[in-house]
Image (cartoon, helix red, strand yellow):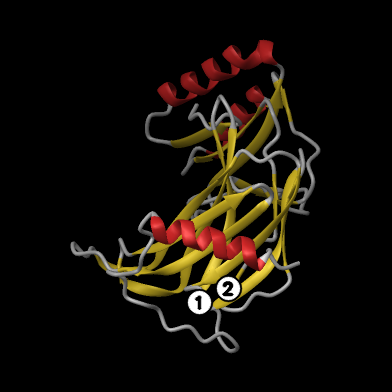
Amino acid sequence: MWVNRNLLTILMGICLVTSCGLDNLNDPILVTDVEDEFYIEMWEALSPSQRTLYLQIRTIQNDTCLNTTINTTLLKLGNELALEVNGINQPEDCLEGLAPAKGEEVVGALHEGSYNLEINLQNTVFNAGQLETNQNRYFLKMDTENGINIPSSVLLRVPENSFWGYIDYGPDELDALAFIESLEQFATRPNLSIGYYGYYTVKNDPNDWIEITNQPNSNRLASFLLTYEDENEATIKDLIEGFRSANPSLNVNVKNYQGLDW
């Protein structure tokens, strides 16, 4: 369903009044019916107070600077959203290297329901769809994907009272596995839907069921995802800290459902 064109015109007028211009941008070449230019991905930022949805944008092709950014605008009015991808910002202090240009927009803490969404490239290429959210997931359903690619249309929501991580154990596999077993005395492996949760992916493999996002590329890695009761939180944190202190050479990465590092 297309976002109301009159509404979009009003929102674009507001943007122009508030100086959302493209004066200093290098415009990307857009081939609307042949090539995709941008990846669009959902991300839920976690904190102790609330959860916030972001739309993250990156170019499919690498740039020659590591710090190239994408100029974007997000227009919101009621249940109408319009993401404007305006152009590429080439940095004055280029950090040389190959990497995609990146940008992101804060959508916010959305109420459950359906939102009309338009993703527009330089006010020239228009893609219409819907963003749906409930207590378990976000779902991005686009009617068209001209110039864009959406790697995952579903972002599952991290469950409450959960924590996850990995241990890059090197030669100390038995110590790492014993540590995870000690955690499982105070926490349990949740029965989660298979899919992408942003911070990790749950897979349909009982022997290799959890993959932490951006985990090291190592064949000596022990990953885990557990949920716990409130009264066990202090004990679990003590176990993690004790294991780190006893194994300072190991990379022990743990994060919880509030976005905190443990």
Quickly name the residue at label 2: 148
Residue at the location (37% across, 77% down)?
27
Residue at the location (60% across, 88% down)?
33
Q: What element carries label 1?
A: loop
Q: Is mark 2 on a helix, strand or loop?
A: strand
Residue 241 image position (x, y, % from top left): 47, 20
Tag 1 near tag 2, CB within 8 Å: yes
Residue 43 image position (x, y, % from top left): 57, 49
Checking the image for residue 93, the label placed there is none
Looking at the image, which residue sits at the far top?
231
Residue 133 image position (x, y, % from top left): 74, 46
Q: Earlier in the sequence, mark 1 or mark 2?
A: 1
Q: In which quarter of the view is residue 34 placed? A: bottom right
Q: Is residue 151 visible?
A: no
Depicted 105 relative to depicted 26: above or below: above
Residue 7 image position (x, y, % from top left): 62, 60
Q: In which quarter of the view is residue 61 placed? A: bottom left
Q: How many marks?
A: 2
Depicted 259 relative to depicted 149: above or below: above
Q: In which quarter of the view is residue 178 placed? A: top right
Which residue occupies the foreground of this view, 182 or 145? Answer: 145
- Image side of residue 78 versus residue 16, left or right: right
Say which amino acid is labelled 1: Glu
Looking at the image, which residue sits at the far bottom?
34
Which residue occupies the foreground of this view, 125 or 235? Answer: 125
Quickly name the residue at label 1: 37
